[in-house]
């Protein structure tokens, strides 16, 4: 098959996200090539060691052009852009990622939290406007990664921001693939630096604790409620309950570690989620730790 992998940082030349973007793109491209597929990816110049680079000046136009020549496509981009870019893929070929309507819901952190609360998934108390007083995490209503996220005791929310109550606990994520069935891959520990600002520094894949099944079931219910498909990641803070704090309807940085420990090709699982049947489980071999500022070597 001819597979389009469109990663935003590489395809748009965004320096601040280049290390993560290139590492995710390389991980996926190598896996699809290993599975015998032909991979194309748009880039402003940066190359990875698998697939064919297609030089472009416009990320959106390159997705339109390349998706028409592909049997399937996968877009990795900031959540507020991802829905529209994925719609382009769906108009021209088979989308290997989440559906656009699911992406839109996940991207709106306020509506996403409301939907999960109504579905009886544990979420932190969330304020969408006005004053807040207590221990809160302030974050953009639309956004990804840890950009613009900080901790605050009181204030008035600016337009475009929400406040979620700070949950004391372990910062984890669950990576899973969803098709006709759901296949949890790993629970991961997130290396988060919590000061006045909250910053993502890397991860440990996998992470085991006594409450893994509870964590996984919460992530599975989350993905099902939000209509996720393909690869997605659910961020959780494990306190008295596993509180869902963010949902990523796309491959996440954890995929870099998962590819190192997974007893299967991640590309094969993504394709099977769309075209076939997922296995009941996958073997995990060992563990892998990565740091965000050391991704250039991966």
Image (tube, helix red, strand yellow):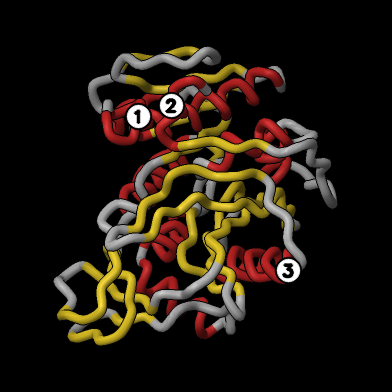
Q: Quadrant of the N terminus?
A: top right
Q: State left or right for residue 61 relative to residue 273.
A: left
Determine the residue positioned at 38% across, 79% down: 165
Q: Position of residue 167 (x, y in %)?
A: 46, 75
In the depicted view, which residue is nearer to us: 71 or 126? Answer: 126
Above-or-below relation of 177 to 94: below
In the depicted view, which residue is nearer to us: 110 or 198? Answer: 198
Residue wearing tag 3: 211
Q: Position of residue 273 (x, y in %)?
A: 69, 46
- Gap between marks 3 and 2, in whole Å? 33 Å
Mark 2 and 1 residues: CB-CB less than 8 Å, in contact? yes
Determine the residue positioned at 48% across, 28% down: 23
Which mark lies nearer to you, 3 or 2? 3
Q: Position of residue 240 (x, y in %)?
A: 60, 80
- Gap between marks 3 and 1, in whole Å? 34 Å
Q: Is residue 58 visible?
A: yes
Q: Badge 3 local density, few (<14 within 10 Å), some, or many (20+)? A: few
Above-or-below relation of 90 to 118: above
**Quadrant of the rendered image containing residue 209:** bottom right
Q: Helix, strand or loop at disc 3?
A: loop
Determine the residue positioned at 38% across, 60% down: 194
**Residue 18 numbered tag:** 1
Q: Helix, strand or loop at disc 2?
A: helix
Q: Helix, strand or loop at disc 1?
A: helix
In the depicted view, which residue is nearer to us: 79 or 89? Answer: 79
Tell how many labels. Answer: 3
Q: Earlier in the sequence, mark 3 or mark 2?
A: 2
Q: Position of residue 239 (x, y in %)?
A: 57, 75
Residue wearing tag 2: 22
**Quadrant of the rendered image containing residue 121:** bottom right
């Amino acid at each position: 098959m001819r597979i389009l992998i469109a990663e935003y940082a590489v395809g748009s030349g965004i320096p601040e996200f280049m290390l993560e973007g290139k590492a995710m793109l390389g991980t996926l491209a190598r896996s699809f090539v290993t599975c015998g597929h032909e991979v194309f990816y748009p880039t402003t110049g940066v190359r990875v060691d698998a697939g064919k680079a297609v030089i472009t000046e416009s990320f959106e136009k390159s997705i339109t052009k390349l998706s028409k020549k592909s049997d399937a496509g996968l877009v990795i981009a900031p959540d507020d852009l991802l829905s529209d870019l994925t719609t382009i893929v769906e108009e021209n070929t088979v989308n290997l990622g989440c559906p656009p309507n699911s992406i839109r819901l996940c991207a709106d952190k306020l509506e996403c939290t409301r939907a999960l609360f109504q579905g009886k998934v544990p979420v932190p108390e969330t304020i969408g406007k006005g004053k807040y007083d207590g221990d809160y995490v302030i974050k953009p209503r639309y956004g990804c990664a840890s950009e613009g996220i900080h901790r605050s005791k009181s204030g008035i929310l600016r337009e475009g921001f929400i406040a979620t109550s700070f949950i004391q606990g372990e910062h984890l994520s669950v990576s899973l693939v969803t098709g006709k069935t759901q296949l949890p891959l790993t629970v991961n520990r997130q290396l988060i630096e919590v000061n006045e600002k909250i910053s993502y520094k890397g991860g440990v894949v996998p992470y085991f604790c006594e409450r893994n099944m509870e964590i996984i079931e919460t992530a599975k219910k989350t993905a099902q409620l939000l209509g996720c498909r393909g690869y997605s990641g659910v961020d959780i803070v494990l306190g008295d309950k596993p509180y869902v704090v963010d949902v990523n309807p796309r491959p996440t940085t954890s995929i870099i570690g998962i590819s190192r420990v997974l007893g299967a090709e991640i590309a094969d699982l993504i394709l099977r989620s769309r075209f076939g049947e997922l296995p009941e489980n996958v073997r995990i071999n060992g563990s892998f730790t990565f740091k965000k500022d050391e991704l250039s070597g991966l």
